[in-house]
Image (cartoon, helix red, strand yellow):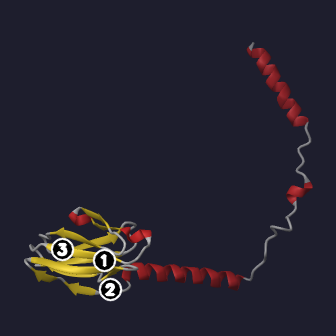
């Protein structure tokens, strides 16, 4: 039985070897619809450098741009500050004192889905921000340092600076 299968396989291989395996001419020619366009090297370099420049600008904007700081005001033994959420966080640098409770009031004006949530990972806080509403986030920072808060996609950032 194995011998019969082997003979059949050998016969099929021989038939395939005898077939004329030419590629049709239409597949070897460059199609008029998809023909390559020659471009000068200078143009390719300019486009590449322009793209790299735009990427650098975007990185600078998201990581280092628009820093605005504000000191939280103490009301009834709670440090309180309103943060406007509109194309980012303003202020995006909040200064508070260690050991005193903090209430950050996030007022969301921006409808983009990226800013639907605020995360304060060091304080184990994740809050949904309703559009055109204020959402309170409360925590007590015990240790001095800098603690990040971000949008749900980690694109927009701010920092809580805790002073001794």
Label 1 packing within 10 angstroms: few (<14), some (14-19), many (20+): many
In which image quadrant can residue 9 be found?
Answer: top right
Local crowd size for mark 2, using a 10 Å CA cut-off: few (<14), some (14–19), many (≥20): some
Q: Are marks 2 and 3 in contact (CB under 8 Å)?
A: no
- Residue 84 at what x, y percent from top left? 31, 80
Q: Earlier in the sequence, mark 2 or mark 1?
A: 2
Judged from the image, the secondary structure of the residue bearing numbered disc 3 is strand
Q: Which numbered tag is attached to residue 133?
A: none
From the image, tell me which residue sits under label 1: 107
What percent of the width, then of the height, locates residue 38? 78, 77
Quarter of the N terminus within the rendering: top right
Mark drawn on residue 103: 3
Compute the Cα span from label 2 to label 3. Answer: 21 Å
Residue 43, how many percent across, how many down? 69, 84
Residue denoted by label 2: 67
Q: Residue at x 71, y 82 (%)?
A: 41
């Amino acid at each position: 039985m194995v011998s019969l299968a082997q003979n059949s396989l050998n016969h099929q291989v021989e038939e395939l070897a005898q077939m004329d395996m030419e590629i049709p001419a239409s597949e070897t020619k460059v199609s008029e619809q998809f023909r390559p366009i020659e471009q000068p090297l200078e143009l390719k370099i300019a486009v590449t450098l322009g793209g790299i420049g735009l990427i650098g600008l975007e990185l600078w904007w998201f990581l280092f741009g628009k820093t605005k700081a504000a000191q939280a005001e103490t009301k009834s033994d709670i440090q309180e500050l309103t943060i406007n959420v509109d194309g980012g966080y303003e202020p995006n640098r909040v200064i508070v004192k260690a050991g005193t409770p903090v209430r950050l009031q996030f007022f969301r004006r921006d409808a983009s889905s990226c800013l639907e949530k605020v995360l304060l990972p060091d304080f184990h806080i994740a809050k949904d921000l309703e559009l055109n509403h204020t959402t309170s986030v409360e925590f007590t920072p015990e240790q001095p340092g800098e603690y990040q808060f971000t949008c749900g996609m980690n694109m927009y950032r701010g920092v809580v600076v805790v002073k001794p």
